[in-house]
Image (cartoon, rainbow, N blue to C red):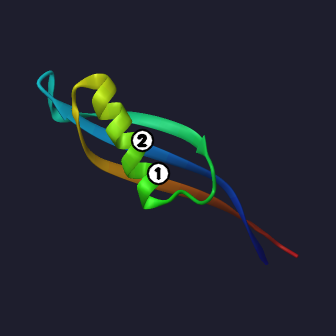
Amino acid sequence: MKKAWNKNNITYTMVGENHPKGLKRNFSNLVEDLSDVQIQSFGKILSDLSDEVFTKAALTSTNDFIVD
């Protein structure tokens, strides 16, 4: 059986005055090897644009398992 990477999705949780319990922002079809720095840097960009605080990121990776 072969394992093949398919895609990455990420959900950023942002908290602000209008969203005290958090607002989730989803992004799909990301590159395979995301670094901590890339995830944190994009969270900062979202914070700067929205005036909300980036509190959490949840990365979901999808792999295919192909029978030989």
- Residue hosting label 2: 42
Three-letter amino acid code of the residue under disc 1? Gln
Q: Quadrant of the C terminus?
A: bottom right
Alpha carbon of mark 1 to alpha carbon of mark 2: how far?
A: 6 Å
Residue drawn 42% across the image and 59% down it: 36
- Residue hosting label 1: 38
Q: Position of residue 60 (x, y in %)?
A: 49, 54
Residue drawn 49% across the image and 60% down it: 35
Three-letter amino acid code of the residue under disc 2? Phe
Asked whether the beta carbons under mark 1 and mark 2 sit within 8 Å of each other, the answer is yes
Residue drawn 28% across the image and 24% down it: 50
Tell me the tag on residue 12. Answer: none
Classify residue 64 by image quadrant: bottom right
Please state which of residues 49 and 59 is positioned toward the viewer in this rendering.
49
Count of numbered tags:
2
Q: What is the residue that sits farthest to the top in this orientation?
A: 18
Q: For label 2, count other residues whose C-alpha is less than 10 Å away and answer few (under 14), some (14-19) or many (20+).
A: few
SS label for mark 2: helix
Residue 50 higher or lower than 31, as above or below: above
Residue 49 higher or lower than 41, as above or below: above
Q: For label 1, count other residues whose C-alpha is less than 10 Å away and answer few (under 14), some (14-19) or many (20+).
A: few
SS label for mark 1: helix
